[in-house]
Image (spheres, helix red, strand yellow):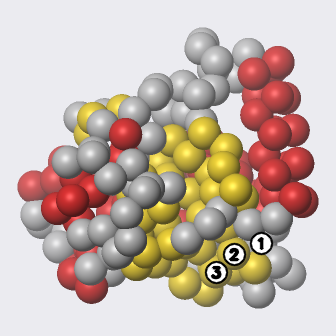
Amino acid sequence: MDTATFGTGCFWCSEAIFSSLIGVISVEPGYCGGHIENPSYEEVCTGATGHAEVIRIAYDDSLICFEKLLEVFFRIHDPTSRNKQGGDIGTQYRSVIFCHNEIQLKKVEEIIRNLNKSGAYDKPIVTEVKKFEKFYKAENYHLDYFAKNPDQSYCSMVVRPKVEKFRKIFEDAIKK
């Protein structure tokens, strides 16, 4: 088992997507990269704590590799948009990868370099790449939020379309 920690904007979207991948054991929404201990959702939402909304992914690397997780990461959000994903604006919604070891760091740097060189995006990738330090689990009501609240307005207008698009692109990698 291995771990990856990503921020792609709102963690409700990310959790719904990554939890459906073959080889992913669990996905926990939470907060990383800030300067206070045990932040609450309300504190993080102000942008004043420095934390990003993230997901911590536990995965079986014999079934899904880190590079595949990165492929999904770069396809499900706009890595060229600083501190903004759709209508979600603020540092808490930044594109960020928290690397758990040097191998992850080297793979992330190589993929970003290759994507920028290939012209895959119209603008340069601004995803922050940081050393993983501390993860704070989000409040329990955030866990499986989309699955439990599919008709909530944000979920039906933002999360569902992202999940549907993801399912079309990564159909062969989704749990049955």
Q: Is residue 126 above or below residue 107?
A: above
Amino acid on which the number 3 mark rests in the picture: Ala
Cα separation, mark 2 vs mark 1, equals 11 Å
In space, the residues marked 3 and 2 are separated at their CA atoms by 5 Å
- Which residue: 16% across, 53% down? 154
Tag nearer the camera, 2 or 1: 2
Q: Quadrant of residue 131?
A: bottom right
Label 3 belongs to which residue? 58
- Image quarter of the C terminus: bottom right
- Residue at numbered disc 2: 3
Residue 41, image quadrant: bottom left
Q: Which one is in front in this view, the residue at disc 3 or the one at disc 1? A: 3
Q: Which residue sits furthest front?
A: 36
- In which quadrant of the rendered view does residue 145 lie? bottom left
Which residue occupies 27% across, 45% down?
Answer: 47
Q: Say what secondary structure mark 2 lies in.
A: strand
State the residue at coordinates (47%, 48%).
8
* Quarter of the N terminus within the rendering: bottom right
| Marks 3 and 2 close (CB-CB < 8 Å) | yes
Say which amino acid is labelled 1: Ile
For the residues labelled 3 and 1, the Cα–Cα distance comes to 11 Å
The x, y position of residue 39, in whole percent, is: 30, 68
Residue under pointer 1: 64
Depth order, front residue of 165/35: 35
Within 10 Å of disc 1 (Cα), the crowding (few <14, some 14-19, many 20+) is some
Instruction: List x then y, in percent, for residue 38.
Output: 35, 75
- Residue 61 in view of the camera: yes
Give neighbour class at mark 3: few <14, some 14-19, many 20+ (Cα, 10 Å).
some
Amino acid at pointer 2: Thr
